[in-house]
Image (tube, rainbow, N blue to C red):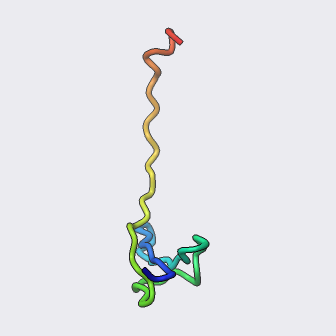
């Protein structure tokens, strides 16, 4: 395993390079894959969930 990994940001379509030991982003994002980094899963943006009333609220 290399000391860097890369991850695709689906919102921007750019790859970010991350140092494995520290977890810090290295350099600027770019459209092409980094040659010296292993690829990991893409960034998933969590969607807000709709708020529903609590059906058990009266029992708590």
Q: Is residue 13 left or right of residue 17?
A: left
Q: Please give the name of the residue rendered at 40% of the width and 86% of the height, measured from the top-left corner.
A: 32
- Which is more toward the observer, 38 or 21? 21
Q: Please give the name of the residue rendered at 43% of the width and 67% of the height, measured from the top-left corner.
A: 11
35 to 19, vertically: above or below:
below
Q: Please give the name of the residue rendered at 45% of the width and 52% of the height, measured from the top-left corner.
A: 46
54 to 15, vertically: above or below:
above
- Which is more toward the observer, 58 or 41? 41
56 to 2, vertically: above or below:
above
Q: Please give the name of the residue rendered at 46% of the width and 21% of the height, measured from the top-left corner.
A: 54
- Which is more toward the observer, 12 or 32? 32
Dividing the picture into quarters, in which one does residue 13 lie? bottom left
Image label count: 0
Dividing the picture into quarters, in which one does residue 50 lie? top left
5 to 41, vertically: above or below:
below
Name the outermost residue toward the top.
59
Name the outermost residue toward the bottom.
35
Question: Could you say where residue 21 lies in the image, as x and y percent from the top left?
Answer: 58, 74
Question: Could you say where residue 16 lies in the image, as x and y percent from the top left?
Answer: 49, 77
Dividing the picture into quarters, in which one does residue 35 lie? bottom left
Question: Could you say where residue 48 lies in the image, as x and y percent from the top left?
Answer: 46, 44
Question: Could you say where residue 14 lies in the image, as x and y percent from the top left?
Answer: 44, 77
- Which is more toward the observer, 59 or 20? 20
């Amino acid at each position: 395993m290399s000391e860097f990994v890369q991850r695709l940001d689906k919102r921007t379509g750019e790859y970010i390079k991350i140092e494995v030991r520290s977890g810090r982003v290295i350099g600027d994002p770019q459209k092409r894959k980094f040659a010296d980094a292993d690829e990991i899963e893409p960034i998933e943006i969590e969607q807000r969930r709709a708020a529903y009333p609590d059906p058990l609220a009266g029992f708590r």
